[in-house]
Amino acid sequence: MFEQTFKNIDDILHKDAGCGSELDYVEQTSWVLFLKYLDDLEKDKATAAELTGKAYTNIIAPEFQWSVWATPKDKDGNMDHHAALTGDDLADFVNEKLFPYLKKFKADALTPDTIEYKIGEIFSELKNRMQSGYNIREVINRIDELRFRTHADKHEMSHLYEDKIKNMGNAGRNGGEYYTPRPLIKTIIKVVAPQIGNTIYDGAVGSAGFLCEAFDYLMNSKKLTTADVTTLQKKTFYGKEKKSLAYIIGTMNMILHGVEAPNIIHTNTLAENITDIQEKDRYDIILANPPFGGKERAEVQQNFPIKTGETASLFMQHFIKILRAGGKAGVVIKNTFLSNTDNASVALRKLLLESCNLHTVLDLPGGTFTGAGVKTVVLFFEKGAPTQKTWFYQLNLDRNLGKTSPLNEKDLADFVELQKNFAESENSWSVDFTSLDQTTFDLSAKNPNKKEEAALRKPAAILEEIKALDEESAGILNSIYELI
């Protein structure tokens, strides 16, 4: 039912003059979905309070509650079409009353780690793009069919929302930057192996895929106590995101996965001077796929000791600095990081190798990120001791990756198994730090265990063989003619 509902909503938004792409569809679906989710959350909290004999005070004032403005019901529990706003009346209510009311929550909230603050922040960043109040009414009616009351409902909804984020990669406007393949994220988390009590950080949070998967991983890691659940909800996951839409989607994605008030901040991570980072600001685990190919302005570059315009290189400096001593990281980056010869790249590799133990490099095939042909690697490192030896694994598949044949967890199972003991194989090998060029710190090591294909012959040799074969054939034919 959920899947068909989403398709129906996309069809409605496609007809609206204010929505031009899949990105707009996700954004507009998100704010309506959030308000429906919030209504169900309030009902659950009210029921829980009633069972313990306590009173529950609604977060949302009566006139702005979903059941009042969006889906008023008659005495039989059916939609009251006479009371339900539509057309211009509904559009005016949403734009002039609902959004301004919800924006105010940010200023009124006591702390940022509350659902009230998240309501205010989300509606400060969003705007209603649906121009037709009739389309708003249709979207509301469809979303009202959805339920978030059971764990199974929320689980299914979170997966469908992930699918919508994935589809944004086909939508232009750099939609693919929001989505990292989930099998890759799950594999990175297995290797990094966070534990309950660790603080987990993504400074380029995007759609929050790393934080959502880490939450699921820890929720299923053992039988949780009430204290464990509180720790996961309040004191485990942290993120920063520069772009408004990605911030909204990331926050919504975490809420749908079960984190009630995600600790995601809407800010440019790179605008922070890394010399200001203190011990209290550091994290135990970093999981990230920072944007690459971007260029940052000179004033942003001044926040970093290694000056470069390349976004991913600035993020790497930030991650190294903000990781706690003994902390662990899994970071996706362009494979050119391993070998670029410019001064900034060389200095960054030296910094990483001397301040952290870069114990594993996973070399991914092209097509891992559908819609992007760029080749990437995953760097796994621990902070506090210099690198002595790095284990490399080259993922060689017997098929080309793409939209119809994406990466799956089975593809990465051999890597996960061999990585436990840094075992050598046809696809894996180790490199000692002392064997690296100590001026360039080039890490683009060739696989010494891969069976080399026979070298291509030179054209002259091929022509020589053709001539010999022709002469041999002519000799055979002559022998036949002589017998005749």
Image (cartoon, rainbow, N blue to C red):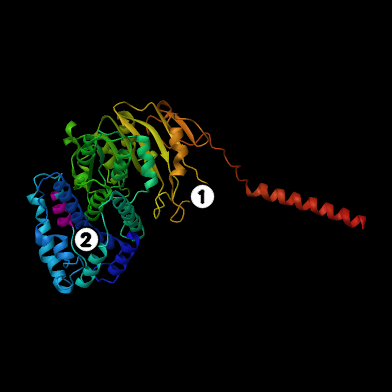
Name the main secondary structure of what is drawn in magenta: helix
Kindly identify the residue that appears in the image at 10 percent across and 66 percent down. Answer: 96
Query: Relative to the observer, which residue lies in front, 91 or 206?
Result: 91
Q: Residues within 10 Å of mark 2 (few under 14, many from 20)?
A: some
Query: Which stretch did the figure color magenta?
Result: 116-125
**In the rendered image, which quarter contains the C terminus?**
bottom right
**Does residue 480 appear to the left or right of 307 in the view shown?**
right
**In the rendered image, which quarter contains the N terminus?**
bottom left
Q: Residues within 10 Å of mark 1 (few under 14, many from 20)?
A: few
Kindly identify the residue that appears in the image at 39 percent across and 40 percent down. Answer: 187
Q: Amino acid at mark 2?
A: Val
Q: How many marks?
A: 2
Label annotation for residue 456: none
Q: Which residue is mark 1?
A: 399
Kindly identify the residue that appears in the image at 48 percent across and 36 percent down. Answer: 446
Query: Relative to the observer, which residue lies in front, 336 or 475?
Result: 336
Marks 1 and 2: which is nearer the front?
2
Q: Name the element at disc 1.
A: loop
Q: Which residue is mark 2?
A: 32
Locate residue 147: give its quadrant: bottom left
Kindly identify the residue that appears in the image at 33 percent across and 55 percent down. Answer: 160
Q: Amino acid at mark 1?
A: Arg
Vertical side of 379 occupied by 460: above or below: below
Determine if residue 442 is in view: no
Please state the horizontal and vertical placement of residue 251, each as a whole percent of the image: 23, 50
Q: Is residue 121 magenta?
A: yes
Q: Name the element at disc 2.
A: helix
Please state the horizontal and vertical placement of residue 263, each as a whole percent of the image: 20, 44
Please state the horizontal and vertical placement of residue 115, each as a whole percent of the image: 16, 49
* Mark 1 to mark 2 CA distance (whole Å): 41 Å
